[in-house]
Amino acid sequence: MGLMQQNAITALIDDFLTARAARKPSVHTLSAYRRDLHLVVQLAEPAPLTVSDLSPRVLRGAFARFAADRAPASVSRAWSSWNAFFTFLVVEGVVAGNPMPAVDRPRQVPLSPKPLRGEETPEELLRAVNTSDERQRDPWPERDVAVLALALCAGLRLSEMLALRIGSIGGRDGERRIEVSGKGGRPRTVPIDAGLDAALVRYADSRRVRFGRAGATAPLLVDRQGAALQRGGLQYLVRSCYQRAGVGDRVPRGAQLHALRHTFATRLAEDGANASEIMRLLGHASLATTQSYIEVTADQQRAAVSANRTNRVLRELC
């Protein structure tokens, strides 16, 4: 009997995940939902016979056990997963109310930005990577510079880079932009300055020489065999760029590609962008997330991007 009811809860979780998938979140987001939901069910005591048995008391106990050996951020993420799950069940008429407000949620310590250390580090990195390294088996500096520039001058996340297509870049001269599929499936448009645009055009030309012309729906970033770059390959590419430039000691621990995105945000703040503009450019869902970067005022998005000092070296290189 208990096993059958446990499967019923599992079926409801599957229904929830199917509904969430329609919003086109990342594979990693769906995996996190699935993992958090199943783990908390397994920790619930007594074992729930129906979803209605997941009372505030049972859930508080399950979350206490879940939190025993996990960071507050992981517990907070799991709480959000369960809150979303119960919200779905209420909407579907499966349960009468959401018990999660009665379950304590750990207070999150505000995340601090982790930009590259050193005033000229981004420029040194781009200049070093722009030079062909004969130690590489198949150097492709045009591609490597373009990858770094997408994070340094457009603030893209790793997943957003991997989702880019050739047709994601468009607009007339002076109004060039990138259409980004952001976190949680939220689309946004990021204006790009002439320096980044030149780097992307140069990369596209080099790619065409290597593999021929590709259509608008083809992945923008590819490996040395012409296949779409994958998560591990992109992470390795960024790490190797740091090593080649000799700036590995200036990368905050655990940041890697995200350090480039944080550098983009902190430089925008230093150059006068306000929190609202940075929020839109980074694709943050909440202004509170952006506030850690900035307490100053600014111009419009395009003026903020044009003021990004890293664009200057790209104009020199391209």
Image: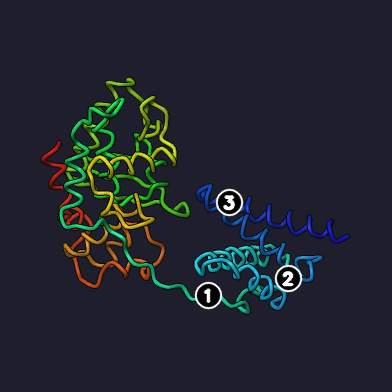
User: In the rendered image, which quarter is residue 317 located in?
Assistant: top left
Query: x, y percentage for residue 251?
Result: 29, 54
The reply to whether the C-beta atoms of the residues labelled 3 and 2 are less than 8 Å apart is no
Residue 142 against residue 14 in the figure, above or below = above
Query: x, y percentage for residue 67?
Result: 59, 70
Residue type beneath disc 1: Pro
Residue 169 against residue 305 in the figure, above or below = above
Q: From the viewer's side, name the closer residue of 265 and 194.
A: 265
Q: Specify few, some or many for label 2: CA neighbours under 10 Å numbering under 14, 14-19, or 20 or more.
A: many
Q: Specify few, some or many for label 1: CA neighbours under 10 Å numbering under 14, 14-19, or 20 or more.
A: some
Residue position for label 3? 31
Residue position for label 2? 54
User: In the rendered image, which quarter is residue 173 located in?
Assistant: top left
Secondary structure type for disc 3: helix
Q: Residue at x 65, y 70 (%)?
A: 65
Q: From the viewer's side, name the closer residue of 201 and 254.
A: 254
Quarter of the image with the C terminus is: top left
Residue type beneath disc 3: Ser
Mark pair 2, 1: CA separation: 20 Å
Q: Residue at x 29, y 23 (%)?
A: 208
- Determine whether, in the image, residue 253 is placed left or right of residue 176: right
Mark pair 3, 2: CA separation: 22 Å
Query: x, y percentage for residue 262?
Result: 30, 58
